[in-house]
Amino acid sequence: MCVQLKSSLSDLAVFGGAPAFEQPLHVGRPNIGDRSRLRARFEEILDSRWLTNAGRQVQEFEERIAVLSGTRHCIAVCNGTIALELVIRALGMTGEVIVPSFTFVATAHALQWQQIRPVFCDVDEKTHNISPDCVEKLITPETTGIIGVHLWGRACDTEALDVIARRHRLAVLYDASHAVACSHGGKMIGGFGDAEVFSFHATKFVNSFEGGAILTSNDELAKKVRLMKNFGFAGYDNVIGIGTNGKMSEISAAMGITSLESLDDFISRNRANYQLYRERLSRIGGLRLIEYDNRERQNFQYIVAEIDDRCGLSRDQLVKVLHAENIYARRYFYPGCHLMEPYRTLYPGAGKELPVTEKLTHRVIAFPTGTAVGAAEIEGICGVISCAVHHAKTVAEKLG
Ligand code: T4K
């Protein structure tokens, strides 16, 4: 890795300078963990000739995730999207379900895929999470549930959502894809609502290549989901209901366990990255990193900033500057689900109710972090940002 530090305008790649990084620097580079332990597990799996269908690795992974999240049941599945689909169905959600638009599109797709209307709800400006006040206004006789997303690992206002759900007899599900190993009010995420869902995609804090899980302390629900993810098999050749193939493979679980073994190391490296970004970017007006609550456990998986007018560059202009430097910052989650298909066609009026979402989707940027990113890379990234913002007027004119 070679970092070209930027001090003057002509150093910037958009003005003809060499890119800051020779190799692309991505958001979402996977955390790998201890390779020798991973290889040993792969050998064990091959030796056992048991590759999938609730083998030893999957059982161990489920146990470890259940312990980590303080939840009675963990059902591991092949990805977070299937986890959402299964539990939405198992909870009996139908008709309309209230969900934020400011999320990865899988949260909405998991509903629409099953002919359930995602009713897009605005988020709180400070937390980026679903706004309980807005939820209440969207409830109709067709509403059967609420899905909150713990965006960036910061928990939703679970207390307020619980009250609303109880009052209107609604199911509550949390998409906790970003919140593995995080807590809320001192209690680990995984145990809130009727159920929570984790993603273990390669880009996630704990990764199993592809993977997901349903967490719940409800015995009945757990039983239902376990059946549904395995074609409805209750025994050797006894199918007792409709199901699908949502199973996690042994290889995936082995990766997941290896990830869990390095959890503390991942957290401390993510935290150090976050602190360094904070230090280096703190004096840039109009660029504000999101805050993490020190009283809670956090995984610091996302380095997210909001860019406002005082910055002199728009979020999209900054993204262009960074991409030219081989720094692939992301516009998570632009443009908001309500402006993606099929939602923009099916529900064209949805944006009128989402002023905060519309603002945030134009302001938010995610920077590279994780164990593949170290101090030198962050110094380089922050140098590019500082230089571009320092010369904001000229850079903005150049980019148009
Ligand atoms: N709910 C929420 C709130 C979610 O964020 C997600 C997933 C889900 C539900 C669904 O869970 P899963 O069904 O995926 O388990 C990526 C991930 O594919 C997606 O899992 C994740 N959220 C989302 C936030 O990020 P994209 O469209 O950004 O993927 P892509 O291919 O552009 O890659 C993202 C970045 O990661 C790039 O900078 C490249 C880098 N990367 C990616 C992979 C796969 C690597 O460096 N190595 C890799 O192996 O969605």
Image (cartoon, rainbow, N blue to C red):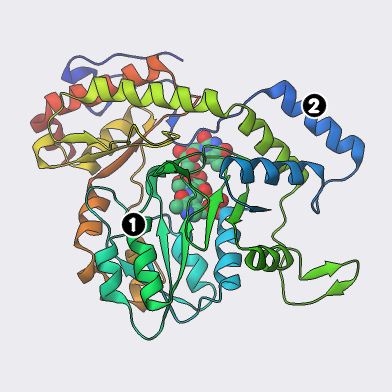
Residue 173: horizontal and vertical position, in percent?
A: 48, 63
Q: Nearer the viewer, residue 9 or 101?
A: 101
Residue 176: horizontal and vertical position, in percent?
A: 48, 51
Q: Nearer the viewer, residue 190 or 117?
A: 190
**Label 1 SS:** loop
Residue 38: horizontal and vertical position, in percent?
A: 73, 28
Q: Nearer the viewer, residue 235 or 5?
A: 235
Q: Residue at x 42, y 13 (%)?
A: 2
Residue 367: horizontal and vertical position, in percent?
A: 35, 33
- Return the residue at label 1: 102
Which quarter of the figure is the C terminus placed in?
Answer: top left
Q: Earlier in the sequence, mark 2 or mark 1?
A: 2
- Return the residue at label 2: 40
Q: Residue at x 76, y 69 (%)?
A: 231
Q: Is residue 13 left or right of residue 115?
A: left
Q: Amino acid at mark 1?
A: Phe
